[in-house]
């Protein structure tokens, strides 16, 4: 169990990188060096500004350079990444699944905030799935499920799904066999339906509100991959 502590720290650290990538990738800003400069005053960040979650707490949610309010998204993403890494490894004993989780968390955040799924991230999910366990069945599952989403996209004239969801589904599908593939899609629609219903009930959404579907695909996928 001792390995869970370094894993949690590793997850927090990657979470800090994901916070930067998911902010900068949809805006085409450079992101390779992580959060190396302040987005407001462009000053270089010091090492202690980059300690995940803790720096947010210690600095009271303000940056140390210009006192700008730091978005709560950063500590939230870092903590989600830390907890997710530990849970996934504890459950599956599989480091590859942890790495896959990092890509999916990035997509989750970007789709939630921008309603887009960058092609290069979907491709990364696809490629890693094929490399992890190549089988014609799984590749067929990926394209078949994606075809179903494409049909929905065409039938709803793009109101329910986006082409990003179609492409992401290929990548997610190649990780699953046939029966798990269908479970994954079913779970995604179920969670999507339940969350949409709750949002309607509490008045946070209207019938016309467009919800990103990517996060639900990712939740349905992770439950299927890890627990079923
Ligand atoms: Zn600043």
Image (cartoon, rainbow, N blue to C red):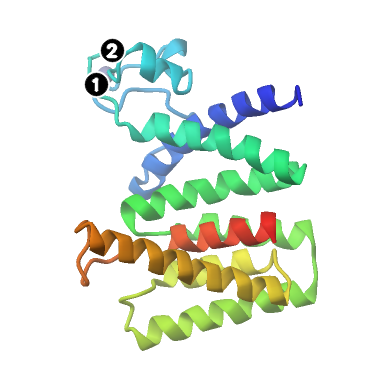
Q: Is residue 40 above or below residue 204?
A: above
The answer to whether 152 is drawn above or below residue 82 in the figure is: below
Residue 35, given in percent of the width and then of the height, sits at 42, 27
Earlier along the polypeptide chain: callout 1 or callout 2?
1
The residue carrying mark 1 is 41
User: Can you see residue 35?
Assistant: yes
Q: Is residue 32 visible?
A: no
Q: Quadrant of ligand 1?
A: top left
As drawn, the label of residue 24 is none
Q: Is residue 51 above or below residue 138?
A: above
Q: Which residue is mark 2?
A: 65
Task: Determine the image quadrant of residue 91.
Answer: top right
The N terminus lies in quadrant:
top right
Q: Nearer the viewer, mark 1 or mark 2?
A: 2
Q: Is mark 2 within 8 Å of ligand 1?
A: yes
> Percent position (x, y) of residue 204?
22, 56
For the C terminus, give its image quadrant: bottom right
Q: Residue furthest front?
A: 201
């Amino acid at each position: 169990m001792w390995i869970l502590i370094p894993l949690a720290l590793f997850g927090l650290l990657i979470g800090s990188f994901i916070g930067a990538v998911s902010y900068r990738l949809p805006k085409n800003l450079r992101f390779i060096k992580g959060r190396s400069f302040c987005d407001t005053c462009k000053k270089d960040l010091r090492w202690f500004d980059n300690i995940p979650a803790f720096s947010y707490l210690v600095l009271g949610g303000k940056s140390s350079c210009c006192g700008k309010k730091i978005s709560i998204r950063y500590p939230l993403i870092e903590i989600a990444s830390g907890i997710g890494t530990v849970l996934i490894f504890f459950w599956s004993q599989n480091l590859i699944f942890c790495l896959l989780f990092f890509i999916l968390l990035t997509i989750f955040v970007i789709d939630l905030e921008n309603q887009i799924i960058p092609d290069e991230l979907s491709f990364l999910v696809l490629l890693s799935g094929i490399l992890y366990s190549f089988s014609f069945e799984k590749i067929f599952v990926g394209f078949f499920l994606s075809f179903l989403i494409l049909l929905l996209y065409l039938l709803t004239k793009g109101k329910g799904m986006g082409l990003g969801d179609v492409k992401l589904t290929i990548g997610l599908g190649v990780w699953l066999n046939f029966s798990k593939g269908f479970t994954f899609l079913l779970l995604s629609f179920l969670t999507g339906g339940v969350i949409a219903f709750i949002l309607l009930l509490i008045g946070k959404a209207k019938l016309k509100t467009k919800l990103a579907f990517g996060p639900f695909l990712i939740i349905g996928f992770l439950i299927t991959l890890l627990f079923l």
